[in-house]
Amino acid sequence: MPLTLVYPADYFKPLQVDENYRLEAEGFSAAGVAVCTWEGQQLRPAPSVGSRLLYRGWMLTGAQYTDMYTRWASQGWILKTSPEHYQLCHYLPHWYHSLQAYTPETHFIEAGPEAPEVLNVCLSNRLNEGWPAAFLKDAVKSLKTSLGSRMTSEADLQPWLQEMKRLRTLEWPLCLRRWEDWQSDTERRYFVYQGQVLSPHRNAENTPVPEPVFAAAACVDSPFFSVDVIQNTQGQWRLVELGDGQVSDTVGWEIAHFVEKLCEAGINR
């Protein structure tokens, strides 16, 4: 049975897709892919019982996704991506060890009253061992305010923790990553659907896919995810992060091209 794509509804017009996803939804609908909106507990129009769903929308925690999966399953609709697959790509600690050779060295600090002290010690030890600096994030997100996530001393840690807690609920463990010098203008986002690598470039044959993308496609057992890569100052491709494809935006992609590549990969079959 073909997939039905589920998008967040417009707040004022629940039968319409939220404007942030409207062009994408219209593209899939024009390509013959079933589309519905999600608002509260309702899907409109309601898919038939037994339908398989693929969510495209706002980022969810693992617990929120599991709740959504369970609620829709109780109504006879099954999300293509299981909660286990969602968490595999959404949380850095779940995929890190499989792709460790392609991404910065990372240490994980679990939640608990002693976490700030453990973080202090871990950062101090890594800097003493020769790290030029560290990059600190929680299991999902980094800090993108003026403070940033670059750590050069223990004095940087407390302001980071305070700012992250102000902006969002921390998703543990914290991830202390070795700082690498990257060329920011080289970052690319690829998608992988059913093991097939989807390139953002229309002339993909003239733009080789970096090795870390193929490595992720080969070893990550999830039906739909994103892969962000970037070149370091030596020209090597490095893996920035994975993300579940359902909650990854199309940064660096033309919407029409994104729709086209997913249809070619079989989303509408």
Image: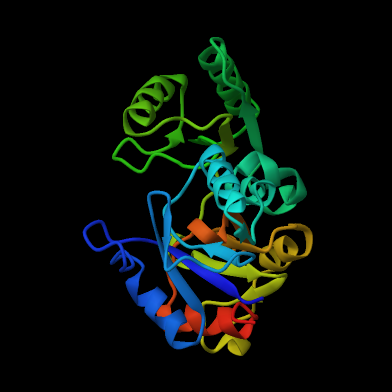
Q: Is residue 231 visible?
A: no
**Is 176 on the left or on the right of 96, as rendered?**
left
Q: Residue at x 49, y 56 (%)?
A: 247
Quadrant of the image occupied by residue 104? top right
Look at the picture and state if 37 lies above or below 101. Answer: below
Locate the C terminus by quadrant.
Answer: bottom right
Residue sitting at x 55%, y 29%: 172
Q: Is residue 23 above or below residue 125?
A: below
Where is residue 69? Give x, y as percent. 58, 49
Q: Quadrant of residue 161?
A: top left
| Viewer-side residue, 242 vs 101 | 242
In this rendering, position of residue 211 left or right of residue 233 = right
Residue 17 pos. (x, y %):
33, 67
Q: 217 or 42, which lies in front?
A: 42
Q: Is residue 176 visible to us here?
A: yes
Establish if 58 lies above or below 192.
above
Q: Nearer the viewer, residue 34 or 186?
A: 34
